[in-house]
Amino acid sequence: MPKGQIRELVEICYQIAKEKGWWDRRRNDAELIALMHSELSEALEVLRQRRSRQELAEELADCCIRIFDYCGRKRIDLEEAIVKKIEKNRRRPYRHGHKRY
Ligand SMILES: [Mg+2]
């Protein structure tokens, strides 16, 4: 993956959220994390209702957008964290030591 693409998405999502007024008032971290969860719950509902893959993708995208926005606001280097975590996972044993899930 070309370097900088996730950083760019983080910045775009944060800028759009600011322009749309989502950062005009103080927001607490727990609320923002809950809203990330809510998008995954919406994705689960798409599956339970046997709706389309396009709708599933949209809910997953919503979750990513909320995470990107949050990282933009908090100046979290999500790209670096993802790259590091992928490398860590690559070095882990098969099924991370035979975990079931
Ligand atoms: Mg949604």
Image (cartoon, rainbow, N blue to C red):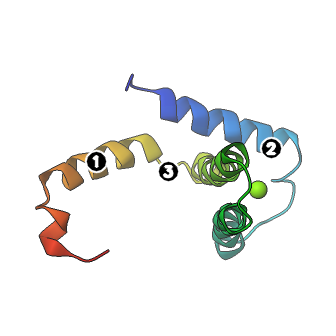
Which of the two labelled residues, at mark 1 and mark 2, occupies the earlier sequence position? 2
Quick one: SS at disc 3?
Answer: loop
Q: CA distance from mark 1 to mark 3?
A: 17 Å
Would residue 44 appear left or right of 85 to someone viewing this image? right
Which of the two labelled residues, at mark 3 and mark 2, occupies the earlier sequence position? 2
Image point (70%, 42%), residue name: 54
**Mark 1 C-beta closer than 8 Å to ligand 1:** no
What's under tag 1, amino acid-wise?
A: Ile
Q: Position of residue 62 (x, y in %)?
A: 70, 50
Q: Is residue 28 above or below residue 18?
A: below
Q: 32 and 74: which one is in front? A: 32
Q: Position of residue 39 (x, y in %)?
A: 69, 62
Image point (45%, 27%), residue name: 4
Q: Residues within 10 Å of mark 2 (few under 14, many from 20)?
A: some
Would residue 92 appear left or right of 85 to someone viewing this image? left
Q: Residues within 10 Å of mark 3 (few under 14, many from 20)?
A: some
Q: Which residue is mark 1?
A: 86
User: Residue 18 has which mark?
Assistant: 2
Q: Which residue is mark 3?
A: 76
Which quarter of the figure has residue 1? top left
Q: Position of residue 64 (x, y in %)?
A: 60, 49
Q: Quadrant of the C terminus?
A: bottom left
Which of the two labelled residues, at mark 1 and mark 3, occupies the earlier sequence position? 3
Quick one: SS at disc 1?
Answer: helix
Q: 82 and 50: which one is in front? A: 50
